[in-house]
Image (cartoon, rainbow, N blue to C red):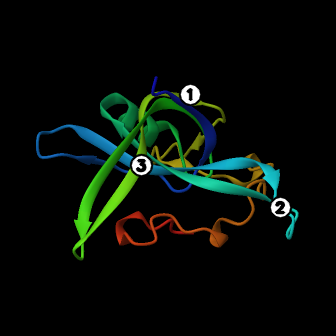
Amino acid sequence: MNHVSLIGRLARNVEVKNTQSGSQVARFSLAVRREYKNKATGQYEADFINCTAWGRNAEFLQKYTAKGKQVGIEGSLQVSSYEKDGQKVYSTDVVVSKVTLVEKVERDNYTGVAQNQEQHIENGNEYGSYDDYEVYPDDPGYDVGF
């Protein structure tokens, strides 16, 4: 059985792109807190899990979520590979089949864009500082942007 269930915070706003065949796809990272604290810092650490959502799940994530907001996802692991500078590089992603909103996202009534408002981030340092982590350090297309 290949099944993954995660709850975490979005590392950046979800952007949807269209493939050449017209399908919609969203690639994003989910910061998932580890169950233990770092002994040196006393802070919880996080793993940044690469995720891919297609079609309606991609649209839903873009429309109803925002960077830093907590979401639940279900899906399956998919391993892929590609060549970079003559080396084979492997990537493991969660292919999302279900999305659950865990936290309310406020939207700007004028633009319809999701707004991360400070008063809704009650556990702002729950995952430590996002600046301490890199997502896809070899791929400039997946810059965390914090």
Decide: few, some or many residues near mark 1? Use Cα within 10 Å; few <14, some 14-19, many ≥20. few
Residue drawn at (46%, 30%) of the image = 75
Q: What element carries label 2?
A: loop
Question: Which residue is more in the foreground, 27 or 82?
Answer: 82
**Image position of 46 with respect to 22: above or below:** below
Q: In this view, does 21 lie to the left or right of 6?
A: left
- Residue 60: percent from the left, percent from the top? 42, 33
Q: Which of marks 2 and 1 is nearer the N terminus?
A: 2
Badge nearest the viewer, 1 or 3: 3
Give residue 84's quadrant in the image: bottom left
Under mark 1, the amino acid is Thr
Secondary structure state at the residue bearing disc 3: strand
Tell me the quarter of the picture where residue 62 sits. top left
Let me know if residue 14 appears in the view.
no
Residue for badge 1: 100
Q: What element carries label 1?
A: strand
Q: Kindly identify which residue carries mark 2.
A: 43
Mark 2–mark 1 CB contact (< 8 Å) = no
- Residue at 57 percent of width and 50 percent of height: 115
Q: Which residue is drawn at 86% across and 70% down?
A: 40
